[in-house]
Image (cartoon, rainbow, N blue to C red):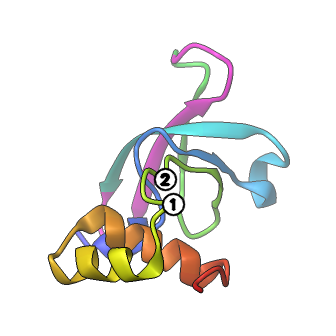
Amino acid sequence: MNQNQFRHFKIGDIIVCKSIWGDKKFIVDKMYGNEWCPILDSHELGKERQTSTICLLNPNFCKLVSAKRPLSKLKKEVLIKLLKNGNIEAKREFEIRVYNKQLK
């Protein structure tokens, strides 16, 4: 599976898919599929996970609303040291900072 499709997503993140669902928010439960058809298995925010609230979304059309970011308060130098050691969470935090233009 190509992990580039899921690089900004993690289980437990809150996402929206405005092109299809408007402002409805979803929580990511599972990630599967391949590079041609990646799938985010999610359920509606604030509702219990049932067959009526489950939704399969394409990560290419989804936007991250709220993420669990345990490394968000680290300085840039410490984050780079973790990147060199191969920490996956540090790589994700670095990509989010670059995307949001918050890398100082």
Q: Residue at x 56, y 30 (%)?
A: 43
Q: Which of 66 and 21 is in front in this view?
A: 66
Question: What span is in magenta?
Answer: 33-49
Residue 82: x and y in percent read: 25, 73
Q: Quadrant of residue 90?
A: bottom left
The answer to whether 100 appears left or right of 5 in the picture is right
Q: Which residue is drawn at 45% across and 65% down?
A: 74
Q: Disc 2 designates what residue?
A: 69
Mark 2, residues whose alpha carbon is within 10 Å: few (<14), some, or many (≥20)? few
Q: Can residue 20 be seen in this view?
A: yes
Residue 50: x and y in percent read: 52, 15
Q: Is residue 35 visible?
A: no
| Residue type highlighted by circle 1 | Ser
Residue 42: x and y in percent read: 51, 37
Q: Disc 1 designates what residue?
A: 72
Dots 2, 1 in contact, CB < 8 A: yes
Q: The N terminus lies in which quarter of the figure?
A: bottom left
Kindly state the secondary structure of the residue where label 1 is placed. Answer: loop
| Residue type highlighted by circle 2 | Arg
Q: Which residue is drawn at 76% across and 53% down?
A: 20
Q: Residue at x 66, y 28 (%)?
A: 45
> Looking at this rendering, what residue extends furthest in the right direction?
22
Q: The C terminus lies in which quarter of the figure?
A: bottom right
Q: Which of 1 and 9 is in front in this view?
A: 9
Kindly state the secondary structure of the residue where label 2 is placed. Answer: loop
The answer to whether 92 appears left or right of 88 in the picture is right
Q: Which of 4 and 72 is in front in this view?
A: 72
Q: Quadrant of residue 35?
A: bottom left
Q: Is residue 72 above or below residue 22?
A: below
The answer to whether 78 appears left or right of 84 in the picture is right
